[in-house]
Image (cartoon, rainbow, N blue to C red):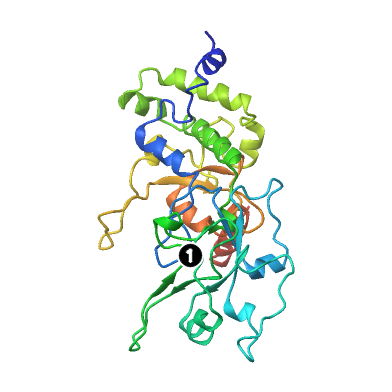
Amino acid sequence: MTAKKNAKAKNTRLSYKLGLPAAIARKVEKTGQTRGAEKDTVYQNRVLRCSTVLIPLSSWKVGVVPPPEGFENGYIVLAHPEEYFSDTPPTSKLDLPKDLQLGKDLLVFYETRPQWIRYHPSHYGWHPAHSRIPPLGGQYLARVPDTTSPGDSLERHGYIDSKTGGQGAGIRIYEYASKTEIEATKYQLSFLVWQTEGIIDMAREEGTLNPEECKAIIEAKCQDMGLIDLNLLQKNRIIDSQQRTVCPLCLKPILAQELASRVEQAEGRNVPDLTVTTANLFHVKELKAGVYNHCRYNLGWGHHHCNAAARDWGVKRTLKWMEEVLTNNGKIIN
């Protein structure tokens, strides 16, 4: 039976995790989640990228465009008190976009002590929001840190417990991806894992009896999904001409072991609970609002330190910066 027929025969139970070492399978799974968030922030911690999106009012005003299919779990626009109220007096509402309604798709977000004091929600009879589906159940949410002043305390209101689905109101807009895109990227990333050096031996050592067959099945599934345009993967610096998975920044081949081994820590800076691995998810084009770059053919596996350098800029801008650094240090760039 061919690999493609095998894939169809096993389609009802086929998973992108098929045959992968457990640690790497978990890594692929986590790519569908947002990054971590602390309880004192407004964002949810490690939830699916298709969750409710939080959009700053400033971004809304400049016309941030949602994806063609919209946000699967809706959105909430957040306005700081200074954006919602005029300065004199602080009870007069400013002109806001007519397509927004407080308590329906708009909340006032308190983030600083001066905001909390000057525009205290009790002045307006407001209640903290508790739903991510309109109506939101309130008009505001707050994440105001504690201070050393007597009487000041941490103010956390809205989306703080299990009654509202856990901590945080939603996710950062640039982290969003639809369920369909999440599934597609996981399969493509699994395909890329199987193109790393040493993955067959590692899978076999961890108990996979037929890693070559698992690799072929995943490849057939990805072929059906349109995820193996080798020319595009190479153009986007995700694989090389030998179809090996490479780091999009330094272009060195990724080793399977790098996807599972912890990054080496500098002496004196050791932490006992470090979970960062030597190679991790890499966005070739950086994440930014209104672009939705967590998508197929933009995700690869890259070295931790390369990722740290390119995280906010993407590969193209980072390479330009690196050229400037080398030139300024007397190095000739061919």
- Please report the residue visible at 72 percent of the width from the left and 67 percent of the height from the top: 62
Residue nearer the viewer, 291 or 212 = 291
Q: Is residue 287 visible?
A: no
Disc 1 is placed on an element classified as: loop
Q: Is residue 116 above or below residue 284?
A: below
Number of residues whose C-alpha sits closer than 10 Å to that of mark 1, classed few (under 14), some (14–19) or many (20 or more): many
Q: Is residue 94 above or below residue 186?
A: below
Seen as rendered, the residue at the extreme top is 1
Residue at the spot of label 1: 42
Disc 1 marks a residue whose amino acid type is Val
Residue nearer the viewer, 113 or 211 = 113
Q: Is residue 303 left or right of residue 223?
A: left
Q: Position of residue 105 (x, y in %)?
A: 63, 62
Q: Position of residue 39 (x, y in %)?
A: 39, 63
Q: Position of residue 324 (x, y in %)?
A: 59, 63
| Total marks placed | 1
Q: Is residue 259 visible?
A: yes
- Please report the residue visible at 41 percent of the width from the left and 67 percent of the height from the top: 40
Q: In which quarter of the view is residue 139 placed? A: bottom right
- Please report the residue visible at 33 percent of the width from the left and 47 percent of the height from the top: 262
Residue nearer the viewer, 302 or 85 = 85
Seen as rendered, the residue at the extreme bottom is 88
Q: Position of residue 33 (x, y in %)?
A: 48, 47
Residue nearer the viewer, 167 or 132 = 132
Q: Is residue 328 left or right of residue 63?
A: left
- Please report the residue visible at 28 percent of the width from the left and 54 percent of the height from the top: 273
Q: Is residue 180 left or right of residue 39?
A: right
